Amino acid sequence: MPRLVRLYITQVAIGFGLAGVFVGLLLWFNIANLWHLVSHSSDGPLAVLILWVANGIVFAGAQFAIAVMRMKDDDDDDHHGGRRQPVMRRDYVAIPVRVTAGRHPVRRSH
């Protein structure tokens, strides 16, 4: 299995695990009376499943993004930055725009 696929699967599993902890804490602390709503409804387990999956998608995406951004390529260490001067492009051409005085394009009626 390629390293990137293994990294993705690992980070998605971590993200869904964190989402499970998050949903558990939401229910434990009864945020927005969520525990009462879930426990007193016949569709409560379905709502918890949907909440977990939706948060799992978000947490997994964020976890994978963090993992990818933390990857480091050792070849880029020779460049230490410095002053970056803006490059002026000479191929821009000014376009004349005709404006008529005294005319308002938007008229408001009361």
Image (cartoon, rainbow, N blue to C red):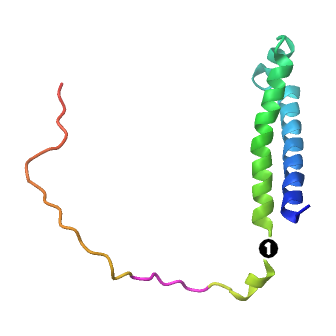
Placement of the N terminus among the 4 image quadrants? bottom right
SS for callout 1: loop
Placement of the C terminus among the 4 image quadrants? top left
Tag 1: Cα neighbours inside 10 Å, few (<14), some, or many (≥20)? few
Q: According to the image, label 1 marks what residue?
A: 72
Q: Is residue 95 above or below residue 49?
A: below
Q: Is residue 26 above or below residue 95?
A: above
Q: Is residue 104 above or below residue 107?
A: below
Left or right of 100, for residue 5? right
Q: Nearer the viewer, residue 33 or 19?
A: 19
Question: Total of numbered circles in the picture?
Answer: 1
Left or right of 85, for residue 21? right
Question: Magenta part mainly helix, strand or loop?
Answer: loop
Residue plotted at (82% across, 11% down): 41
Left or right of 102, for residue 82? right
Q: Which residues are magenta?
A: 82-88
Residue 92 magenta: no
Residue plotted at (79% across, 73% down): 72
In this orientation, does residue 47 appear?
yes
Q: Position of residue 16 (x, y in %)?
A: 86, 42
In this orientation, does residue 30 appear?
no
Residue plotted at (74% across, 43% down): 58
Q: Position of residue 47 (x, y in %)?
A: 80, 22
Residue 35, by quadrant, is: top right
Residue 19, by quadrant, is: top right
Residue 85 magenta: yes
Q: Position of residue 43 (x, y in %)?
A: 82, 15
Q: Position of residue 106 (x, y in %)?
A: 19, 39
Residue plotted at (84% across, 33% down): 23
The single residue placed furthest to the front in the displayed view is 1
The single residue placed furthest to the right in the displayed view is 1
Q: Amino acid at mark 1?
A: Lys
